[in-house]
Image: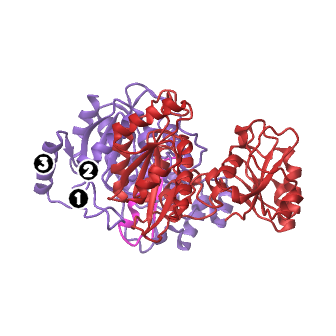
Chain colours: A red, B purple
């Protein structure tokens, strides 16, 4: 568990995209961040108040979160001075970068000297069990995609927001680095050893009240040959009661795989649902989340109406229009 | 690569089942083992000549393979004297046990002193890449099961034997501990980090002659919630041209999961084949391998004839009847 509130470190981000972790936190957990810290030359802005380390500590910040990615995912020497100063002032550090905080001797030394914690959310902190498949109380929903990086995490966070507004009991369950930094906890599933993947998902989504929803962050795609095993572990470890199908209609091939086309929503449904029912026989596909970013308003509206007719299910862009119609569908289960 | 030939260490095995790794090597690679080493009280017999360490060295043995499993998979103190003596006499050691040779200080010291190698085949020795999905030349076959531990490895080894007898080019590609000790190389897939599973399978089954068959050892089952992700990584990383369906008809529930029934062969086919075709659009199901151990001859014959009619595919028990009819089906692809 990472201590909140955060100060978001944007460093010397060369553009807005480099700070997408900070943006995710600012978008979905504004109450978790007192402000942002930008170095000279920073080209990103998460829309929060700029603060010095001292101002942020004054405002209650407990963890400095690295919300920026370098090319190559390394911890830049230019950042080190700030990070070491922050440890000295009582901040913990949290990072989802490929290069680990705990491998940087100067950071380890400063953390030890000042009794602070270094959170590397890219590596598992727990010995997960092998999945036992025992049915758990509580309800669970999972988004499965026609491809990777198609909006499954944003869909999950939009569902959480919609459910909270209605006073429904729910928890966003993070399965990736950005999600973990947003939620402050979770499982970095792509870094878990194969035998323990499904068990890690069971651990992540334990027994709960019968009217509580776990909103599980999806990963990969059953149709993406590089990562499909991770997706199936989520389906079988998560025992979802409900699936959301996620899609991006303008993508011309699977991410990183130029020779692979995306499956249709029908094909995704026909493969994902029988597999989900192995672990939870009452699982249903309840709706479709489309990432319409590349479409104008009319085009998005037409496309969604067409999908809705074809599939007989609510089809929305949760980022553009909110997730209310998906929340309706889940509330009626 | 583990150096052959082996001396098989059966230790103080309490029964025949405890020595199943040694039995697998003796059954499928008799040319790789000069003999077996048994301690006082050993209740197992792999059917090879009993030899002392000195006799085995004389006969050319280069590696002492731990072919026995303790309860808990530990390295027994009672074995240590033999293992250390073997290192001193020039043997390498190889083990698939959960407890690692490299974690035993006395073994590490003896190996270092004598310049020998400790092979722990349970842990990956390679940094595998992320799968790129690029189509590779050569042909590949994979057995997929209605459950785990249903005879997929024996099916693969029987296929290899049948192909070799006909002079077909082929390689058994091990994906588990016992398979790796049998083949002397392979990938311990269940110990690979999630993101790299499919890439490890691509690495295991590289480009090859167009008339060469990789016979990939299967793992888990798409329907076994604890391990299904590993199975899907094999389907997508292995790009099989041919699938064999594996089944054990008397099993009353999935292994280790009392509340889960086995799927039918039809259900397995209808899920596995579309998933396999994501990576290899020409993949076909070519036959069915049934483990009929629990049936008498007549019962097995009737059952296989019934499956063959129902599924319209050759159905055999490769261990009982040889894999010839499956080899026929593969040779015609």
Q: Where does the image place residue B199, in percent across and percent down from the top left? A: 53, 40
Q: Nearer the viewer, residue B167 or A93?
A: A93
**Which of the numbered marks, if any, corresponds to residue B293?**
1
Q: Where does the image place residue A147, in percent across and percent down from the top left? A: 49, 38
Q: Nearer the viewer, mark 3 or mark 1?
A: 3
Q: Are marks 2 and 3 on the same chain?
A: yes
Residue lying farthest to the top in this orientation = B210
What is the magenta range? Answer: B3-21
- Answer left or right for A33 relative to B172: right
Label 2 vs 1, first from the N-terminus: 1
Q: Tell me if I can see residue B226 in this picture.
A: no
Label 2, secondary structure: give it: helix
Instruction: For the C terminus of chain B, give its image quadrant.
Output: top left
Q: Tell me if I can see residue B13 in this picture.
A: yes
- Answer left or right for B290 relative to B152: left
Q: Is residue B19 magenta?
A: yes
Label 1, secondary structure: give it: loop
């Amino acid at each position: 568990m990472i201590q909140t509130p955060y100060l978001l470190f944007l460093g010397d981000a060369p553009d807005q995209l480099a700070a997408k972790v900070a943006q995710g936190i600012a978008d979905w957990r504004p109450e978790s961040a007192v402000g942002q810290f930008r170095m000279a030359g920073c080209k990103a802005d998460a829309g929060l108040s700029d603060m010095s380390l001292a101002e942020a500590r004054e405002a209650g910040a407990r963890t400095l979160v690295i919300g920026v990615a370098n090319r190559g995912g390394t911890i830049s020497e230019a950042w080190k001075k700030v990070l070491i100063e922050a440890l000295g002032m009582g901040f913990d550090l949290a990072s989802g970068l490929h290069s680990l905080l705990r491998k940087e001797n100067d950071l380890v030394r400063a953390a030890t000297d000042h009794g602070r914690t270094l959170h590397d959310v890219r590596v598992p902190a727990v010995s997960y069990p092998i999945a036992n498949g025992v049915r758990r109380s509580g309800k669970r929903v999972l988004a499965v995609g026609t491809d990777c990086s198609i909006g499954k995490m944003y869909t999950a966070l939009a569902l959480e927001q919609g459910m909270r507004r209605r006073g429904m009991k729910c928890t966003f369950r993070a399965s990736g680095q950005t999600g973990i930094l947003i939620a402050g906890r979770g499982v970095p599933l792509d870094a878990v050893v194969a035998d323990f993947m499904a068990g890690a998902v069971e651990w992540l989504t334990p027994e709960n009240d019968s009217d509580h929803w776990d909103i599980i962050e999806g990963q990969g795609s059953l149709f993406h040959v590089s990562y499909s095993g991770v997706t199936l572990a989520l389906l079988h470890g998560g025992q979802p009661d409900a699936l959301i199908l996620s899609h991006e209609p303008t993508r011309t091939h699977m991410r990183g795989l130029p020779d692979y086309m995306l499956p249709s929503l029908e094909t995704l449904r026909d493969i994902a649902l029988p597999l989900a029912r192995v672990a939870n026989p009452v699982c249903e596909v309840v709706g479709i989340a489309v990432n319409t970013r590349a479409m104008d308003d009319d085009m998005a509206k037409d496309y969604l109406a067409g999908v809705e007719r074809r599939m007989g299910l609510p089809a929305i862009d949760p980022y553009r229009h909110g997730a209310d119609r998906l929340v309706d569908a889940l509330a009626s289960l």
